[in-house]
Image (cartoon, helix red, strand yellow):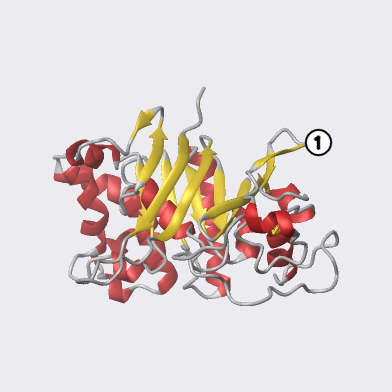
Amino acid sequence: APALLQVRDLKKHYHSPRRWLAPARPAVQAVDGVSFDVARGETLSLVGESGCGKTTTAKSVMRLIEPTSGSVKLDGEELLSLPPEQMRLRRRDVQIIFQDPYASLSPRQLAGEIVAEPLRNFGMNSAAERRERVRWLFEKVGLRPEAVDKYPHEFSGGQRQRLGIARALALNPKLIVCDEPVSALDVSVQAQVVNLLMDLQAEFGIAYLFVAHDLAVVRHISHRVAVMYLGHIVEIADRDTLFASPRHPYTEILLSAAPVPNPRTPAKRMLLQGDPPSPANPPSGCRFHTRCPLAQDICKTQAPALSARPGNTAVEHQVACHFR
Ligand code: SF4
């Protein structure tokens, strides 16, 4: 069976408006040819520095941002060519949780109404049925049933994220895009919300496309991890392989800078040299060559393809580097 989500050669280029008589500025290549699958019930995390394109990729999958080109198939159906009304209908299968739950919740709606809204929009016409489903959802995400009559500002940050999760869960989605869902929360609350997401996945078989920069969280929740740099995926592997035996120089540096002790990564911290280049003017060849400690001449002219490396796990380990 095909994967639940199949993303192929996804691109998002932003064009800045051309000024009168001024030369057109180059397009910003926020996402530049990204391909990956997410299986049913799986968590795939996208990681990388800010500006690497991970959030743009995740939002493009739901068409909250319209991609420039590529293919996004959900259950075999192409989403990018769907007319708006049909895309709206497909959204019941793909939901999103945002970093800042407060910004995504209407402050003037009661919590119960916020969660009931998607139910009403998708045809659950009986108010009694909606009320019952909302109470059940509140229980599933660990909110007390009385909380239906509260406003979002009366909730703590963690409770608001639970409310966002209840709303995302309302329509039984197959996939939830999680855009930095715990990075605005206190560390103790982060663990509770991450564990809630994992429990819901175990119970309902939901797949997550999980965008995060916190590698400890990523290590806890992911089945597979894709590392992005300047709009490209540079490495993708199952979680244990990626954390124990990273192959791409960028992944190595990223992991060595993380506060997660790891016996297999070098004890010395490696630091990234220089600033990240602009995605409006990415380096030729391998985009990482301006900061890579292993770069050779070929790296300046030839872009390495993301390709499989032999390994002893069932899940394919892909790396984009001439020398790894
Ligand atoms: Fe570094 Fe070259 Fe590999 Fe790119 S292809 S990561 S520059 S060694």
Q: Where is residue 233 in the image (x, y as percent from the top left)?
A: 57, 51
State whether residue 304 appears in this view.
yes
In the image, 229 versus 104, the foreground residue is 229
Instruction: Establish if 231 lies above or below 152.
Output: above
According to the picture, the residue beneath numbered tag 1 turns out to be: 312
Residue at position x 64%, y 62% in the image: 288
The single residue placed furthest to the front in the displayed view is 21
- Could you tell whether 37 is left or right of 167 in the image? right
Q: Where is residue 305 in the image (x, y as percent from the top left)?
A: 63, 44
In the image, 13 versus 85, the foreground residue is 13
- Could you tell whether 203 is left or right of 94 in the image? right
**Amino acid at dot 1:** Asn
The quadrant of the rendered image in which ligand 1 is seen is bottom right
Residue at position x 14%, y 40% in the image: 126
- Could you tell whether 168 is left or right of 130 in the image? right
State whether residue 140 appears in this view.
no
In the image, 160 versus 275, the foreground residue is 275
Cβ at disc 1 under 8 Å from ligand 1: no
Q: Label 1, secondary structure: give it.
A: loop
Residue at position x 32%, y 70% in the image: 102
Instruction: Establish if 223 lies above or below 21.
Output: above
Task: Tell me the crowding category of disc 1: few under 14, some 14 to 19, or many 20 or more residues within 10 angstroms, Cα based.
Answer: few
Q: Quadrant of residue 129?
A: top left
The single residue placed furthest to the top in the displayed view is 1
Q: Where is residue 185 in the image (x, y as percent from the top left)?
A: 49, 73
Q: Position of residue 312 (x, y in %)?
A: 81, 36
In the image, 62 versus 137, the foreground residue is 62
